[in-house]
Image: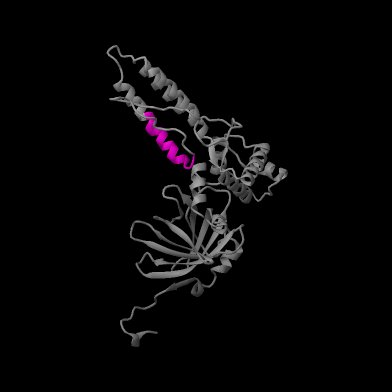
Amino acid sequence: MCLGWIKSVLIQWGEFRTRINSETSRRSKTTLPNGLNLSCPDQQGYAQPRYHDTKLNNIQNISRRVHDFKSRVVSSCERFRDEKGGFRNENEAFRKNILRFIKYDVLLQMMFKTIHVKALIEALAQKTGQPMDHAGFGQMSESIDGKINISQKYLGDVYREVNKKIANGTFNTRNSRPHLNAIAQFLDYKHFDHFSATQDFNLSPVMHACLGNWWSYALSNNGQYIYQAPVKIYMSESPVDLLMELKGSERSFKGSLREDGTCLSGFLDSSKGKKLGLVFRLSNSLKIELLQGVFCGMSSAGEPIAGKELLVREKELTFREMKWAKLKPNDESLHENIRRHFSIKESSVIKVQNIVLNIEDLV
C-alpha cells in the first residue's frame, strides 16, 4: 500500500510540474532548507543523505538529479517491501522526506537566471520595435498571441524586478515557467531553457538580429529565372549553435553560421552530394530587413558556379508555410529593386565558361 502511495505521489508531482502557474514567493534563497534529510535506503539499511544544502549553480544539473532520485525512490521501495506487501515503520521518515523534497523541487523549477529573464524581455522589445516603458509593454502584450495571457502589467513588473535584482547582485529570480516559455516561443525558440542556453552561447546583438525567416533570391545559371527560396536562421538546442536552413526545389541545405568581422558566413550541406557556401555583409543596425551577399557552389549540371544573393526578411509566414518558387526576372510579384538588382546577368552569375588544361589556352 505504501509503495502505491509513493508511486501515486510521484506521478501527481510530475503532472503538477507541467502546470506550474505564475504563483511567486518572497523566498529566493538558492540553498536547500537546513536539516533536510533525503536518505535513501539500501540493502545495508539507510545510507547517508544524498542531497543537502545544495546551491543552485546549475538548474539543469539539479533537474537531472531529481529524475535520478525519483528512479531510486521507486527501486528502493520495491526492495524494502515486507512479506505482507507493506513497508516497515521506520520508512515513515523516508516518506516524509520525499514530500519535502518534492515541495522544494517545485521551487527549483521556478528559478531562472536573472540576466536571462531580462534578456528575454529586451529581445521581445527588439522584435516588436517597442520601447521599454508602460506603453511599450502594452504593445508587446498585444503582439503575443497564445494560450497564455502575457499582460502589460506582467511584463512591466518582471522587467522592474530583474533590474532591481541585478543591481542588488541577485543571481537567480523566480518566475512563471509557462509565461517565460510563451515569450520564448514568440521569439522563435522552443522554450525558455532553449533561449537561456543561447545566452550562454554569447551571440552578438547583430547576429541575434539575424534570427528569423527570410526569402533568398538568386539568379539561375542561365539567367532566365530568379529563384526564391525559404530560409530560416535559428539557434539549435543541443548542441547550441547558430544554424541556417534553406529549402530548395528538390533538397534542403543546412549548416552553421558564424560572424567573421563584418560578415556572416556559412557552409550549408544538403547531405545528398551538394554543398553551398554563403557570405553576407552585416551592418551595425539591429533592425536588419535585408542582407546582401554572394553564394558559391555547384550547378545541377555539376559545374562550379557563384553569384549574388539577397536575403529579405519575412515577417508574416512561418517557415513551413514558405514555398520555393521559380520566377521570371520581370515578374511583378517581385519588388522592383530586386528585379533591378539581378537585371544584368554578367554581374549576377559567375561560372567557368571553358575548361582548359594549360595556361596558354586560358582566355
Q: Dividing the image into 4 quarters, which one contains the N terminus?
A: top left
Q: Residue furthest bottom?
A: 360
Q: Position of residue 240 (x, y in %)?
A: 44, 50
Residue plotted at (31% across, 22% down) = 78
**Where are the magenta residues, as a range?**
56-70
Q: Is residue 241 visible?
A: yes
Q: Which residue is at 69% across, 49% downward?
A: 131
Residue ID at (69%, 45%) = 136
Query: Residue 305 versus residue 47: which sits nearer the camera?
Result: 47
Looking at the image, residue 159 sits to the left or right of residue 262; the answer is: right
**76 shown above or below 326:** above
Residue positioned most to the right: 135
Residue 165, image x, y percentages: 62, 43
Q: Position of residue 289 (x, y in %)?
A: 59, 58
Please tell me whether residue 60 belongs to the stretch shown in magenta.
yes
**Of 217 and 85, which appears nearest the observer?**
85
Q: Is residue 222 visible?
A: no
Q: How is the image coloured?
A: one colour
* Residue 55, magenta (yes or no): no
Q: Which image quadrant: the C terminus? A: bottom left
Direction from residue 292 to residue 78 in the image, left or right: left
How many numbered badges does the structure rendering display? 0
Above or below, 110 relative to 236:
above
- Viewer-closest of 193 and 275: 193
In the picture, measured across the screen, residue 125 lies left or right of residue 329, that is right
- Closer-to-camera residue (292/109): 109
x then y, percent, for residue 245: 45, 54
Asked if residue 228 is positioned above or below residue 99 in the image, the reply reads: below
Name the dominant secondary structure of the magenta segment. Answer: helix
Question: Would residue 109 appear left or right of 23 to someone viewing this image?
Answer: left
Q: What residue lies at 40% left-to-right and 33% top-to-bottom? A: 67
